[in-house]
Image: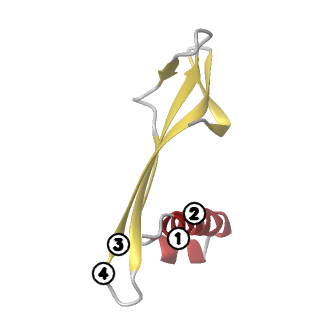
Amino acid sequence: MKIKAKKPIIKNGIEYPYYAVSLSMSPLWKPGLGASVAIRLTPFRELEDGTFESLPGQPKAISLLDIFETAQGDPAFEDAIQGIMNTLQNLIDNKEL
């Protein structure tokens, strides 16, 4: 997967224009039900031979205790969370789970 960086990482004059994404969500069993999330964005670039080179020591990380509380004050984050939740719901519906 190639997620294009808005501001590519440049290290030693080499541009790493993409992120590989690691996403983990866990439910919070509380009144109103919540969810915690951890997102790790690892910069990488595609080489001429079709292979990839990453910068594993240069990740950007987002860690939130309750994504729904955070989303209330951040419209961009709220859109992202709603997109993820809608996509998961579609998968569950399509797989009849």
Q: Which residue is drawn at 33% across and 76% down?
A: 28
Q: Mark 4 points at which residue?
A: 29
Q: What residue type is labelled 2?
A: Thr
Query: Mark 2 — residue?
Result: 87
Please tell me which residue lies in front, 3 or 67: 3
Cα–Cα gap, marks 3 and 4: 6 Å
Does residue 52 lie above or below 97 as drawn?
Answer: above
> What residue appears at the point 49 percent right and 77 percent down from the top-left corner?
69
Q: Which of marks 2 and 4 is in front?
A: 2
Q: Earlier in the sequence, mark 3 or mark 1?
A: 3
Q: What residue type is labelled 3?
A: Pro
Specify the label residue 93 is tagged with. Answer: 1
Q: Alpha carbon of mark 1 to alpha carbon of mark 2: how far?
A: 10 Å
Q: Is mark 1 on a helix, strand or loop?
A: helix
Q: What element carries label 2?
A: helix
The residue at which mark 3 appears reads as 27
Residue farthest bottom in this picture:
31
